[in-house]
Image: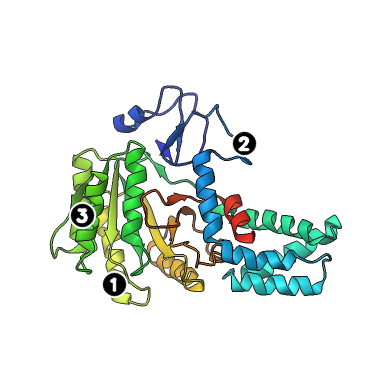
Amino acid sequence: MFSFFKKKTPPAAPAVAPPALTAAIPAGGGSLIGSALVIPIDIPDPAAPPPERQKWVNKLKASLGKTAGSIATVFGGSVIDEALYESLEDALLMADAGVPATQYLLTELRRKVKDSGVTHPVALKNILVALLTDLLQPLQKPLVIGEHRPTVIMVAGVNGAGKTTSIGKLTRHLSESGASVLLAAADTFRAAAREQLSVWADRNLVEIISQEGGDPAAVSFDAVAAGKARGKDVVLVDTAGRLPTQLHLMEELKKIKRVIQKADPTAPHEVLLVIDGNTGQNALMQVRAFDDALTLTGLIITKLDGTAKGGVLAAIARERPVPVYFIGVGEKLEELETFNAREFAQALLG
């Protein structure tokens, strides 16, 4: 199976993988980071990421640069006092970290400062980076492909979050790793959605199941059935964008999930929510609503393009820790990468 972007040593007696996936990995084992195959025995220093990953880290830092600059000014003094803690609280709240996560970080920060006896703000910042990394760590999980064939991935999100674009980017990652992908155009509510997904299918050279004016659940059922019949590794189901307050549309999502299960009782194997990184605490509300309705397995955070504050991931980690599989920082196909807790904490805090 593929465990995307996560290094792991090959098991002593590996399970038989589907032919398409087995062919993509050398006999010596390996796993994928981005589009590069990495042999497990060649583990790079985590402090010095590979050049391709470093480019991504630099993009992430630039995207969160405004927030990082605001937080960094808090540590510009020479003493740790109550005024610093108050300024830090304001900065974290302004970064959309939310009250529960901010209170947790400040409480732990005060405790660790007391226990360690540090007196300089720079040391305080280093402790905060470690605390935020630990808080975000539960969100750092890989998207695993190969336990089921096909792996059925249902993708949801509100209008404008970048859902269909993210599906296109994810399709590219999957295809480059050697997985065969089938797209399902189950967003039949938006006029241009089917055409937009068809463009992504053409760009990624993958097949698509589409019906003009078709029922979303029926399209999803047909796609899963076709994926099984054609031996596809992944079926990606694009659903209509909707607000969680649109109860009739949320019920439609539940119906799609039920109908998918009729085609494959074990599916959907992944239920992803695409979130616009600019929406702040609204993103947390979306996670709660969609998780309650569908039981989410992962998130894709989009549009971290310089205006997003980014702190909402701390709020999500504290209140509804659904794994963040990918982060997008732009519109290009390659501008989607896996989430790393420490990288994100360092980029957010400057």
Q: Secondary structure at mark 2?
A: loop
Q: Amino acid at mark 3?
A: Ser
Taking 292 as reference, is 210 above or below it?
Answer: above
Q: Nearer the viewer, mark 3 or mark 1?
A: 3
Foreground of the two, 278 or 253: 278
Horizontal and vertical percent position of residue 121 = 78, 62
Horizontal and vertical percent position of residue 134 = 64, 54
Please indicate whether residue 214 sits to the left or right of residue 97 in the image: left
Q: Is residue 140 visible?
A: no
Horizontal and vertical percent position of residue 230 = 19, 39
Foreground of the two, 116 or 150: 116
- Residue at image location 33% in from the left, 76% down from the top: 247
List the residue tagged with mark 3. 198
Q: Amino acid at mark 2?
A: Asp
Q: Amino acid at mark 1?
A: Leu
Instruction: Tell me which numbered mark, 2 or 3, is placed earlier along the sequence.
Output: 2
For the residues labelled 1 and 2, the Cα–Cα distance comes to: 47 Å
**Mark sitting on residue 249:** 1
Foreground of the two, 7 or 319: 7
List the residue tagged with mark 2. 45
